[in-house]
Structures are given as C-alpha cells and as structure tokens.
Image (cartoon, rainbow, N blue to C red):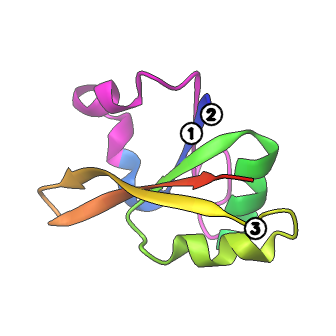
C-alpha cells in the first residue's frame, strides 16, 4: 500500500522529528483532519479500504471493527514502532484481502 492513515492517538508521527517513519508512504491521512476525530472504527476501515491505506494506531483493539466492513475478511497487525514516551507500541494494521 502506498498510503497511511494516522489515528488520533499517534498524530505525533506527523512531527518533523518523526516524519522519517512515514517516508515510504505516498499520501498521509490523519484522523481529525481527513476524518472526524470521533468517527467509529468501522469508518476507519471503510476509509482505509477506499483510499488504499494502512492504519497506524496505538489502539490495540481498533482492528476488531474492521471486520464490520463486509468486504474485509483479513487484516494483518504488526508492531510498527514502540513509543517510548507513552510506553506503548504503535500498531500497523493492513487490510489483506
């Protein structure tokens, strides 16, 4: 995939010192700018599907609602980076099918 959606809980990835993590993406979308901050995870799934995006999130349950989107059967989840300040991983969620 060439695009990425950054969840509200890790928008710091857009900061100048963190941009290196996003350099392999053609387009970077952000919750709170390209989607409403309070949209449901199902909406994130639809957005990712329609815009050919991967999702970066600190929410370890965000992917569960991806399956509410009828065309999504398989997602791949991996640890993208570890956020030392918050002592938590940032997950990369990819729609596989």
Q: Residue at x 61, y 28 (%)?
A: 2
Residue range highlighted in magenta: 12-39
State which tag comes first along the sequence, 2 or 3: 2
The percent position of residue 73, horizontal first and vertical second, equals: 75, 67
Q: Secondary structure at mark 2?
A: loop
Q: Residue furthest right?
A: 70
The residue identified by callout 2 is: 1
Find disc 1 in the rendering and name its residue. Answer: 4
Q: Are marks 1 and 2 in contact (CB under 8 Å)?
A: yes
> Based on the displayed image, in which of its 4 quarters is residue 68 positioned?
bottom right
Q: Position of residue 20 (x, y in %)?
A: 30, 25
**Distance between mark 2 and mark 3 Cα atoms:** 17 Å
**Residue 95 seen anywhere in this rendered image of the structure:** yes
Q: Is residue 7 left or right of residue 90?
A: right
Classify 10 Å Cα crowding around label 3: few (below 14), some (14-19), many (20 and above): few
Give the position of the N terminus as an image quadrant.
top right
Note whether 27 is above or below 11 in the view shown. Answer: above
Q: What is the crowding at mark 2: few (fewer than 14 residues within 10 Å), some, or many (at least 20)?
A: few
For disc 1, the neighbor class at 10 Å (few under 14, some 14 to 19, many from 20) is many
Q: Could you tell me how far apart the alpha carbons at marks 1 and 2 are, in whole angstroms?
A: 8 Å
| Residue 64 in picture, x, y percent from top left | 60, 78
Residue 1 among magenta residues: no
Looking at the rendered structure, which numbered label has been put on residue 73? 3
Q: Nearer the viewer, mark 1 or mark 2?
A: 2
The quadrant where residue 40 appears: bottom right
Give the spatial CA distance, label 1 vs label 3.
19 Å
Report helix, strand or loop for mark 1.
strand
Dividing the picture into quadrants, the one containing residue 79 is: bottom left
Q: Vertical placement of 14 versus 67: above or below?
A: above
């Amino acid at each position: 995939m060439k695009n990425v959606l950054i969840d509200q809980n890790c928008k710091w990835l857009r900061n100048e010192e963190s941009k290196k993590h996003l350099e392999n993406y053609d387009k970077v979308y952000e919750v709170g700018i390209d989607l409403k901050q309070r949209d449901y995870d199902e909406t994130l799934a639809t957005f990712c599907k329609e815009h050919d995006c991967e999702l970066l999130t600190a929410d370890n349950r965000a992917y569960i609602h991806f399956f509410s989107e009828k065309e999504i059967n398989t997602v791949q989840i991996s640890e993208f980076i570890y956020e030392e300040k918050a002592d938590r991983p940032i997950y990369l969620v990819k729609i596989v099918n």
